[in-house]
Image (cartoon, rainbow, N blue to C red):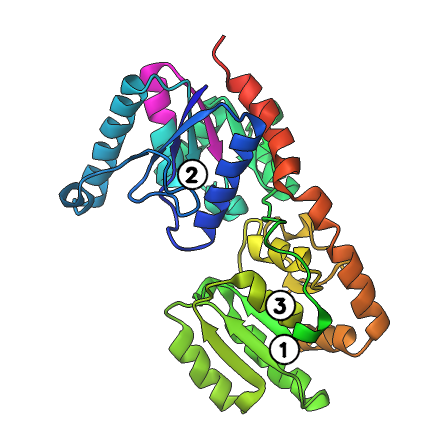
Amino acid sequence: MRILQVNNMGIGFGFEQSASNQFLSILAARPGVELRLLRDTPLESQPDVPVITLSLPLRKLPGILRTVCRLLQAVAGILRHKIDFVHGIHLWPQGFLAFISAKITGRKCAITIVAGSREVGLKGGLLQRAALYCLKNCDAVIVTGEQTRDHLIANQVSPSLIRVIPNLADMDHFKPASESSRRYDVVSTSRLYSVKNVETTLRALAIARETMPDLKAAIGGKGPERERLETLAADLKLGDGVEFLGYMEDVADVLNQGRLCILTSRSEGFPISILEAMACGLPCIVSNVGDMAEVAKHDWNAMVIDDCEDAPAFAAALLAVLGNAERESRLSRNALRVRETHSFEAASQAWAEVLEKMSPK
């Protein structure tokens, strides 16, 4: 079976990891598959996989012209390499390109939604109507959780087209370390972008330190918000209570230096960072957004806060875990259950069913 994966979203960020994980799950589901990528650079985890890419001058064209060039390139690649089905990761423009090129060439098409209902944005307008048309008329829609699935069904996408395949973590890499490696009480591993709302994390830390003055936190990740966040940390008088780590060479190593993980995002699909933290045995304090509830269960393996801006609520959750050894241990044990449910093996079983549907008859 030959697959063309249209995947050029979020290079260097979480979408990149999501794409890589899906790639590996497909290979595990059907080891003999031939998979080619339509994107600007090789996939970091699979540098030897053939990549169909635009030349640098064409990448600099205005958006619509660049998209047309990618479409022509996709059609040519499908025909040249005798592709059986086309898989788009992220709806716009990858899913559109996958859908249109598949229809032109008479191939089957699957579209993966990686950022939850926010990505689909079915609220009217030309692009949203086009998105809904693609989702209703492709051969399979992959979503990461029931919340996104329900959102699509409410917008008249047939339930028979939708397959829930949760995000996953590399369980061979993300695993618990010894307690002696814990340097921080709290760790945060995310891009430093406005949508991640790290500001609320800092405000929660400042409140929690009024009760637990020795609280230590690490903020991992890079992004345009870093300078503003460092200024805020100084204004909140966090001092040496918070350390900005910048780009993380090894996220697992950072996670294993913490006792719990916090994510105060305003919007998410199904965050891989939380799976990675839980795979290391960290209880998580999270905002209730996107498909988060698929993995984070309040007071079972996490503490879930409904209002992502409610710093006092996050602070109370931090203290409820860090100040109660029995709760921290119980949440940690339950967090480790994701190693059974969100592994490459679990995802590959779901992908095997999708690939069977996509197989040429």
Who comes first in sequence, dot 2 or dot 3? 2
Residue 120 visible in image: yes
Count residues near mark 1 (Cα–Cα under 10 Å), then give few for <14, some for 14-19, many for 20+: many
Q: Which residue does the image show at 72% across and 88% down from the upper left? A: 211
Count residues near mark 3 (Cα–Cα under 10 Å), then give few for <14, some for 14-19, many for 20+: many
SS of the residue under disc 1: strand
Left or right: 11 in relation to 292: left
Left or right: 195 in relation to 294: left
Q: Position of residue 138 (x, y in %)?
A: 46, 23
- Write the start and end of the magenta stretch as one range: 99-112
Q: Position of residue 272 (x, y in %)?
A: 57, 52
Q: Quadrant of residue 74?
A: top left
Going by the numbered disc 3, the residue's amino acid type is Ile
Residue on which disc 2 sits:
91
Residue on which disc 3 sits:
262
- Tell which of 234 and 23 is nearer to you: 23
Q: Which residue does the image show at 68% across and 64% down from the upper left? A: 177
SS of the residue under disc 2: helix
Whole-angstrom CA distance, mark 1 to mark 2, is 38 Å
Indicate whether residue 101 is drawn in magenta: yes
Eyeballing the image, is 311 above or below 149?
A: below
The label number, if any, that marks residue 184 in the structure image: 1
Q: Position of residue 160 (x, y in %)?
A: 61, 23
Whole-angstrom CA distance, mark 1 to mark 3, is 12 Å
Left or right: 83 in relation to 168: left
Going by the numbered disc 1, the residue's amino acid type is Tyr
Eyeballing the image, is 15 above or below 66?
A: below
Who comes first in sequence, dot 1 or dot 3? 1
Q: Which residue does the image show at 51% across and 68% down from the upper left? A: 197
